[in-house]
Image (cartoon, helix red, strand yellow):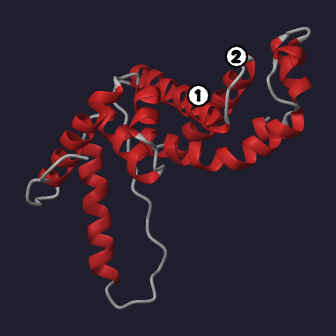
Amino acid sequence: MFTRDMTVSEVDRLAGVTGAEAALAMTEDAFRAFYDRTARPVWGYLARLTGDRALADDLLQETFYRFLRSGAAHESEAHRRNTLFKIATNLARDAHRRRRVMPFFAPELPDVPSHDDVGARFERQTDVGRAMRALKPRDRAMLWLAYAEGSSHQEIAGVMGVKTGSVKLLLFRARRRLAALLGQPAVKGGA
């Protein structure tokens, strides 16, 4: 059963928790709306980190389950979203540790474009996919959060468990490593 098909009360019954509805900071309708807004980006993040769509489905379900079970009060939508990405990051790390050899990035095949340069575009995307797979998991996750999700340095720090002041340098280094793998000139300046 997928999380999106479960009600809050079913989650409580699965967990054997009594009175958990009172501990939850959101109503069932609020959770469904939050799920609809965040499930796709979190799934995309997990799919890129793990390189496995089926594993991303499982981790997405576990992410929302743990989010609900925590029962934590959140001060804003952004705080809820950051908590969700932090849980997803930790679950992906745990999956990586269990498997030890896991591709953390799987490039998606592009849609057929209408322009004439199909071969060059596919080659460029394939090169980026290979380069991303060659990066360390933390670099891949930070680049994804910064450029695919548009997360701020403070949000990235919270998700990745690093100091906010170090995010700029870590992103710079990750971009430089990616550029080197792509055979591009070194990235100049900071984030």
Residue, far bottom: 116
* Closer-to-camera residue (76/4): 76
Relative image position of residue 128 (x, y in whole percent): 28, 58
Which of pointers 2 and 1 lies earlier in the amino acid sequence? 2
Looking at the rendered structure, the number of numbered marks drawn on it comes to 2
- Crowding at dot 2, Cα within 10 Å, few <14 / some 14-19 / many 20+, comes out as few
**Label 1: how many residues lie within 10 Å, few (<14), some (14-19) or many (20+)?**
some
Q: Quadrant of residue 74?
A: top right
Cα–Cα gap, marks 2 and 1: 10 Å
Quick check: can you spot residue 126? yes
Q: Kindly identify the amino acid type of the residue bearing the numbered disc 2.
A: Ser
In percent of the image, x 12 and y 60: which residue is there?
A: 184
Residue at 91% in and 10% down: 19
Where is residue 127 drawn, in percent x and y?
25, 61
Secondary-structure class at tag 1 = helix
Regarding residue 2, the answer to whether it shows in the image is: no
Specify whether 139 is left or right of 11: left
Q: In the displayed structure, would residue 76 be above or below residue 161?
A: below
On the picture, is 47 further left or further right than 180? right
Residue at the spot x=22%, y=48% of the render?
175
Q: Are marks 2 and 1 in contact (CB under 8 Å)?
A: yes
Q: Is residue 85 left or right of residue 140?
A: right
Reading the image, the residue beneath label 2 is 70
Q: Which mark is residue 6?
A: none
Residue position for label 1: 83
Residue depicted at 46% across the width and 27% down the height: 158
* Residue type marked 1: Thr
**At which x and y percent is residue 3?**
76, 35
Q: Is residue 111 above or below residue 48?
A: below
